[in-house]
Amino acid sequence: MPTPLHQHISKILNNDPAFSEEISSSFRRLKVKKKTVLLSEGDPCRYIYFVERGCLRLYFTKDNGTQQTTQFALENWWLSDYTAFNAQTTAQFAIETVEQSEVLCIDSQGLEKLFADHPAFEKYFRLVHQRASAAAQNRIRFLYELTREEMYTNFITKYPDFCQRIPQYLLASFLGITPEYLSEIRRKATKPA
Amino acid sequence: MPTPLHQHISKILNNDPAFSEEISSSFRRLKVKKKTVLLSEGDPCRYIYFVERGCLRLYFTKDNGTQQTTQFALENWWLSDYTAFNAQTTAQFAIETVEQSEVLCIDSQGLEKLFADHPAFEKYFRLVHQRASAAAQNRIRFLYELTREEMYTNFITKYPDFCQRIPQYLLASFLGITPEYLSEIRRKATKPA
């Protein structure tokens, strides 16, 4: 049965890749409970993760000790601390599961071997990162353009199911507001006109 | 003589690519004056640009009519409105030269042909976008973590030469502050302790 990764590769490359089996064996599958820390700030960043089921978050710890979530990764998303993973240095971000999750992970060496052995996988990853570049440009625009309230409205409009899945304090952290202010925005948003 | 693009490819791929000539002929070189608009909001986004000399900026027009710069591209940087370029739709961002510049440009079809003909170019672009993903994660972190004043200090520490090159009103726009407030921060920063 094709795994979520195979399906995603086929979808992105618009083909039926013949290398599914070899690719699969290069990854390690982890079944992890909710709130499992996969990467800690200051630890070597060895892996890049592909979410088969569940949700991860990327965050850093602020000077005042609170955690700031900057990114979520749902099904079919890749996630790592890319600066640390690319340079094989220590992480400046942490990664934790938001829900019980199944993720595939691979280290830099394994990934490079896949690129060397399968040019189509190189193409797939180029397209994944090309889409990530587009998403980042829009994300940065929203951070300049939208008020916190507009960011919330934008977020629930684009990702209504996701907003049901994640705890409200994490959504508030991602939006850069207090949970109390998020409750206030939500009350206003659901109030009949 | 190797062009800046050849040198950049060789540096990123850590090799001496044999395909330099074929790659060159696929690009169009533009010599453009300062403040030339290469892409307007609402126009089809046909090209991706590589900066050989000079500087580009990516911006959008806010509801109040002011331009918000969200990204600069210096020598050896690639730039496009990636959402529009990837989907071949109309641009939601504009691109303008900040200085007199020499840029290479290529359309989506030309780029796809280069990927099909030269697997090494696919690898190069995967690495370019992988670095861009890392830069975007850090950029988003700074937007959450740093005050405008800290963003300025961070920016001049990382890119001192660049800050000398760009007009102060563009730097202010990029930092999301007024030119007056930027002058105030600069005065404080240069004041002897």
Image (cartoon, coloured by chain):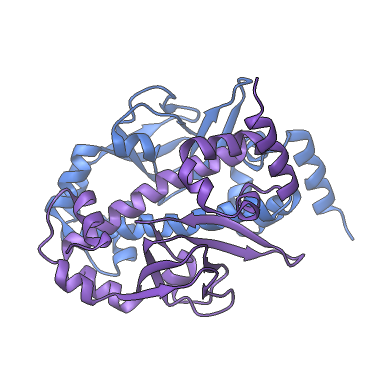
Chain colours: A blue, B purple
On the question of residue B109 being in view, the answer is yes
Residue lying at the far front of the rendered structure: B192
Q: Position of residue B55 (x, y in %)?
A: 46, 60
On the question of residue A156 being in view, the answer is no
Q: Nearer the viewer, residue B56 or B167?
A: B167
Residue under the point 39% across and 74% down: B31
Q: Residue at horizontal 38%, vertical 38%?
A: A83
User: Residue furthest toward the right?
Assistant: A193
Does A173 sit left or right of A6 as displayed? right
Quarter that holds the C terminus of chain B: top right
Q: Nearer the viewer, residue A13 or B52?
A: B52
Using the rendered view, name the quadrant where residue A171 is placed: top right
- Which residue is at the front of the view, A102 or A121? A121
Picture residue at 45% right of the left edge, 66% below the top:
B80
**Vertical order, B54 against A76 (above or below):** below
Q: Position of residue A48 (x, y in %)?
A: 33, 39
Residue A51 lies, in percent from the top left, at 39, 44
In the rendered image, residue B122, in percent from the top left (x then y), is placed at 23, 61
Q: How many marks?
A: 0
Instruction: Name the side, left or right, on which A135 lies relative to A145.
Output: left
| Quadrant showing the N terminus of chain B | bottom left
Residue at point 22%, 77% (across, down): B25
Which quadrant of the figure has residue B10? bottom left
**In the visual, does B188 lie left or right of B51?**
right
Please determine whether, in this image, residue B180 is positioned above or below residue A177.
Answer: below
